[in-house]
Image (tube, rainbow, N blue to C red):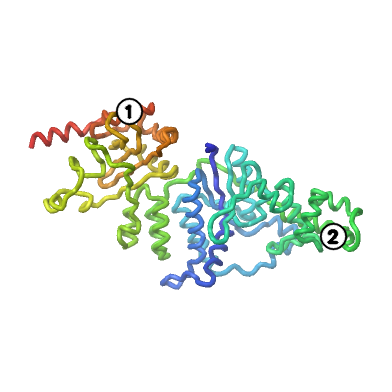
Amino acid sequence: MSDQKRVFLVDAFALIFRGYYAFIKNPRINSKGLDTSAIMGFMNSLLDVIKRERPDHLAVCFDKGGSVDRVEMFEAYKANRDETPEAIKIAVPYIQEILKAMHIPIMVKEGFEADDVIGTLSKQAEKEGYKTFMVTPDKDFAQLVSENIFMYKPRFGGGYDIWGIPEVQEKFGVETPEQVIDFLGMMGDSADNIPGLPGVGEKTAKKFLTAYGSMENLLANTHELKGKMKEKLEANGELGLLSKKLATIMLDVPVTFHAKDFELDQPDIEKVTELFNELEFRNLLVNFTRTFAVENAEKVNSAENSSEEKVKTVAKKAATAPEGQFDLFAAPGSGSVSDAEIASGFKTIKNTDHFYQHIDSPLSRKLLIRKLMEQTSVCFDTETTGLKALEVELIGIAFSFEKGKGYYVSFPEDQEETRLILEEFRPFFESEIEKIGHNIKYDIKVLSNYNMPVRGKLFDNCALFNQSRYAS
């Protein structure tokens, strides 16, 4: 799998309108009478992209004030569009508040369209070695596709199509994605009120592109045409060139791709929860929590006012810990919890507030590592295929640094993949952060099989546990 970093640029209004019309026959109205269809539709799409792709970098791009340059060129540009539905006007401030709470950058420049903002950022990111995915259903973006820039196109009924160069060539009948500009200029675009060449539709535009390659070359060779078409093109050459300009996505908007600012970050879960509760997005809140659940999930539990079943993400053990290994997720010294122990007052998983999280994706590992590096002391425990430390294979590591919370990182059977995943945790294991374990010598030996040193102050509670047991 390529280690090339990926940035996803979301066309905000395209997904907002799409979300709104998806619910048009059954709009989502909350108890306050607010039509939340556009907000819900957009957020569902955004979370779907994050869950599917776990992007390294992400930004959402908005229009503001339309395209000043295009309106100056052609006053009727987009003048045929209906008034924006009130529900969408109301939705935009809410969506931007949610994005701010999620720490997702909002990219907008007054006087420019989101197309131009995305085009500019895509080309900047490409120059810095990033692979860019433009999240939009708008076919106009096909002109920007390159070896490292793709359309990430929502599919009706769910899922996404990824358009690279081959897909654009097949869809538009062009040799290069840049020719999509000529295609759009020739046939026009009724949605944007781009006039195009009179009498030229999709089939004719493809035929002209095959024969002439560009708008300019077509207009320079109208003498080869016959009849009405020849007359129309010779009379409307300037309109064709204007249409091509209107269809061209600008690449010089005064915005800048700063990789650090675009990194997908841990959201302000408390603030997002507050906004979702205000909008009465109960199911969406569960969806959000499951997507960003490395920390603070208990806040959603209380805010949701529902059973733990709705938001729990239980840490899954890859295998039962062999006898003799301490289990971070069980009561000390016991393999199982009996009813008698519960009755006797022992603190167990059944009667103690807890939050255990299975860490099984690049994003969740990234967020966990960030939290680990903020601690002064962390307890960890390896799960393995046996007891002989220098012969076993690693199947998981559990971490805990706060009362009642545990995080379990599972590893695949493929040991090369395990090594790569474990390598992500090297900054933690080599740091001066105190490491606590139960028979920690065993864990250190296991990690040494993967050339992973354990540094910093070490504390083994195995000896302390045995001392207290023998003393009693």
Name the outermost residue toward the left: 472
User: Is residue 40 rendered to the left or right of residue 114?
Assistant: left
Q: Which residue is mark 1?
A: 391
Return the x and y of residue 182 as percentages of the image width and height.
Answer: 76, 52
Return the x and y of residue 450 as percentages of the image width and height.
Answer: 38, 28
Q: Which residue does the image show at 20% across and 49% down from the upper left? A: 348
Closest to the observer, 61 or 341: 341
Closest to the observer, 323 or 271: 323
Residue 368 can be seen, yes or no: yes
- CA separation in Å, label 2 and label 1: 79 Å
Return the x and y of residue 461 as percentages of the image width and height.
Answer: 21, 34
Closest to the observer, 146 or 281: 146
Mark 2: secondary structure:
loop
Amino acid type indicated by mark 2: Asn
User: Is residue 321 rendered to the left or right of residue 86?
Assistant: left
Q: Which residue is mark 2?
A: 236
Give the vertical position of 182 relative to 370 (above or below): below
Q: Which residue does the image show at 39% across and 32% down from the upper left? A: 427
Give the vertical position of 201 relative to 105 (above or below): below
Task: Sort mark 1 into few (<14), some (14-19) or many (20+) by Cα contacts within 10 Å.
Answer: few
User: Is residue 363 rendered to the left or right of residue 114?
Assistant: left
Residue 262 can be seen, yes or no: no
Closest to the observer, 335 or 37: 335
Numbered label tally: 2
User: Is residue 292 rendered to the left or right of residue 332?
Assistant: right
Mark 1: secondary structure:
loop
Give the vertical position of 424 relative to 223 (above or below): above
Amino acid type indicated by mark 1: Glu
Quarter of the picture holding the C terminus: top left
